[in-house]
Amino acid sequence: MAELKTLIEGGLGADEILVAARTRSLVELIQRHLSESGLPAVFLADDRSGEHDAIHVATLHRLKGLEYRHVCLVDISQGVVPLENAVTAEANDALQHRADLGRERALLFVGATRARDSLSVSYHGRPSPFLPA
């Protein structure tokens, strides 16, 4: 939160900032928290339209083709990225397990590469196994 306020106070437009997370419920929580903290925020709708002068919030699935000066990836934690229920158990189907992990890794890659100038990544508890040590 303080990071976003500092960026805006430093001259970055709110609409040049994206906050993204893996799940829609977390994105909705983030939007509500930002708004309650006095930071304008808008959830990116499926038509990719967003209010000007507001921080854009979206799921990682929603980001392909977008670009922002600053991107915050939130809750890139173990069990969230990769999302546990989105990955087939290796014991059930090793080939599908590898494909599922690849898809989850690609989703994180797309989110991280939406940042033109700067990227911040946060997690709670243990970090995603996709994050470097």
Image (cartoon, rainbow, N blue to C red):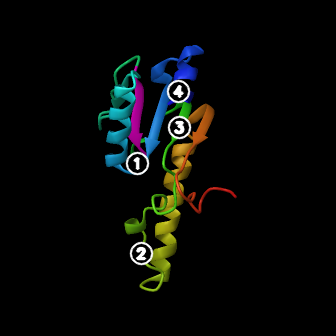
Please state the horizontal and vertical placement of residue 29, each as a whole percent of the image: 34, 41
Q: Is residue 19 left or right of residue 25?
A: right
Secondary structure state at the residue bearing disc 2: loop
Mark 1 vs mark 3: give the one in front.
Answer: 3
Q: Amino acid at mark 2?
A: Thr
**Along the polypeptide, which appears first: circle 2 or circle 4?**
4
Q: Earlier in the sequence, mark 1 or mark 3?
A: 1
Q: Residue at x 52, y 47 (%)?
A: 110
2 and 1 marks in contact (CB < 8 Å) = no
Q: Give the residue number, with chain letter if any, for mark 1.
A: 61
Question: Is residue 56 covered in magenta?
Answer: yes
Closer to the chain start, of discs 2 and 3, is: 3
Across the whole image, how many numbered discs are drawn on residues?
Answer: 4
Q: Is residue 77 above or below residue 12?
A: below
Q: Quadrant of the C terminus?
A: bottom right
User: Does dot 1 land on a helix, a strand or a loop?
Assistant: helix
The span shown in magenta is: 54-59
Residue at point 57% right, 57% down?
Answer: 127
Residue holding disc 4: 4
